[in-house]
Amino acid sequence: MRIILITLILTVNLSHPLFAKIASVIGNPISHEIYFEVNKDTKNYPASLTKIMTLYILFDELRLKNININDRIYFSKYATYQQPSKLGIKEKDFITVDELIDSLIIKSANDAAVAIAEKISGTEKKFVIKMNNYAKELHLENTNFANPHGLPNRANLSTAYDIFKLSSRIIIDFPEHLHRFKKTNVKIKGKNYTTHNTLLKKYDHYIGLKTGYTRKSGFQISLLSINADNYLLGIYFGGNSAKERNNKINFLMNKYKNKEASKIEETKKLTVKNEKKSTTNYTVQTSSFKKISKSKMHIILLKNKIKILRSFEHQIKKNGRYFISYINVDDHRTAKNLCNEIKLNKLDCLIKTS
């Protein structure tokens, strides 16, 4: 009865003209398979989900070593003038990049968003140009950014599907930072801040990429669920309250999490006969990265893209400065078939005799 009621509420809200801003996408962030969508390409105000792009650029700057995690970020007069939610840091005072990342995710601090924009690009205006250049590179076809924080601006527009794609790229490109989105509180300058995402406190399997709200956008969320190696990403725009948004995204995530899990189990049953128990003779190398987090994420990508690979054991070993992911098999034909499947997906592999 409860499921029927939630479904009915969802259907009514999605069809009612007063809730035309509602949009949602549920799918796999690694394979990009979409399980559910409503108004996925309808342009909406992304509110603080805008900060996902600000974070993506910040993570990229860290990767490129243009900035360091312990660098000081000073607040200009313009940064201190931003509307709440904000830290309230005084002009010429500073926090570290490490603290700033947490302030963007947990506090959703608008002054911090401007401060990092000015640090990276010199001015907010130049940073917005960078944001839109990144949007083009990431194929966010219906997105235009007007600021780094998401405060109301008619030109700051995106879609549920574009936010899905952007959130997916955070997950794939910067897995070493995913743990930050799991945090529920942080202390900065002697003040304690708690996340707006109460789902993180209730359920261990959720990683809260970002929440957002303005009066025109409604309550929004980008939410990641991880169960074993199964990733599920949900985007929801336009809730009337945080509670309503959380109930609807939680309902949808549970519905499609179960569907994905059953599909994977069925695939395993069909492919388990390919497993061999005899002595291993061949190794299929699937990746080589300097960071083990990248190797782990690549294994997840392979399993999501290529169903047959889910029935094989993926291992990681360190070879010099690199972490190597690989699969052991006992005959050349199996190794060749697996490598061909990987190459069909435009990914690299290498067969070695062990």
Image (tube, rainbow, N blue to C red):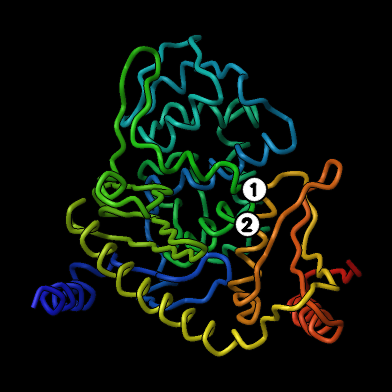
Q: Which residue is mark 1?
A: 293
- Whether residue 224 sits left or right of residue 286 in the image: it is left
Measuring from the top left, give residue 284's x and y in whole percent.
81, 70
The amino acid at mark 2 is Met
Residue visible at 49% across and 45% down? Answer: 146
Look at the numbered discs 1 and 2 and tell me whether their residues touch, using CB distance below 8 Å. yes
Measuring from the top left, give residue 345's x and y in whole percent.
73, 77
Q: Which residue is mark 2?
A: 297
The amino acid at mark 1 is Ser
Residue visible at 61% across and 71% down? Answer: 303
Residue visible at 46% across and 23% down? Answer: 79
Q: CA distance from mark 1 to mark 2?
A: 6 Å
Viewer-closest of 209 and 257: 257
Q: How many marks?
A: 2
Residue visible at 61% across and 20% down? Answer: 70
Measuring from the top left, give residue 1's x and y in whole percent.
8, 78
